[in-house]
Image: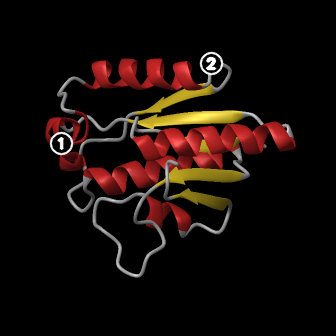
Amino acid sequence: MPLLVPFDGSTLSEAALERAVEFGECLDRNVVVLAVVPQEKRYLEDRWGETDPETVIERLQARAHDLVPEATFRVERPSDPEDEPFADATMNVVRAIREVANDIDADVIFVGSENAGRVSTPVTSVGAPVSEDPRYDVHIVRHAE
């Protein structure tokens, strides 16, 4: 069963990827790097300073490949929040991560998040909602050092 790493190019997602690779080497597990790139331009601009999703995907794939050339890279493009009036982009990212984890039968998800698992959860964190699913273990990376 593979290890899943949601990857947004942040320092913490890079640290999560590095830890997943170390873990995978010990247990002989494949690492799947998941880039979830919503189509919402405002989300793209806020998160990556870019409004073209294809450019974001290319950058994320290049960075992931630089860090771990042997990892499998997967992209999910969740629906626009306008298509689902009760879901925002962050909720759609969480849904995509959970669906991929289920689809690949992930053993563990490695999430880079400063906030996951704390008593108060920021609205934009995917760490806490992803960690609520009991079907897989979650390794939360809070420090990139």
Q: Position of residue 82 (x, y in %)?
A: 18, 48
The secondary structure type at the circle numbered 1 is helix
Looking at the image, tell me whether mark 2 or mark 1 is earlier in sequence order: 1
Task: Decide if residue 90 is on the left or right side of residue 71.
Answer: left
Q: Quadrant of residue 65?
A: top right
Q: In the figure, 70 relative to 48: above or below? A: above
Residue 98 appears in the picture as rendered:
no
Q: Residue furthest right?
A: 27
Residue at x 66%, y 43% (from the top left corner): 20
Q: Position of residue 38 (x, y in %)?
A: 30, 38
Q: Which residue is mark 1?
A: 46
Q: Nearer the viewer, residue 83 or 49?
A: 49
Q: Residues within 10 Å of mark 1 (few under 14, many from 20)?
A: few
Q: In the figure, 64 relative to 91: above or below? A: above
Q: Amino acid at mark 2?
A: Pro
**In which quadrant of the rendered image does the N terminus lie?**
top right
Q: Position of residue 120 (x, y in %)?
A: 35, 79
Task: Decide if residue 48 is on the left or right side of residue 144.
Answer: left
Task: Decide if residue 31 is on the left or right side of residue 119.
Answer: right
Q: Residue furthest bottom?
A: 119
Residue 42 appears in the picture as rendered:
yes
Alpha carbon of mark 2 to alpha carbon of mark 1: how far?
Answer: 28 Å
Q: Amino acid at mark 1?
A: Asp
Q: Which residue is mark 2?
A: 69
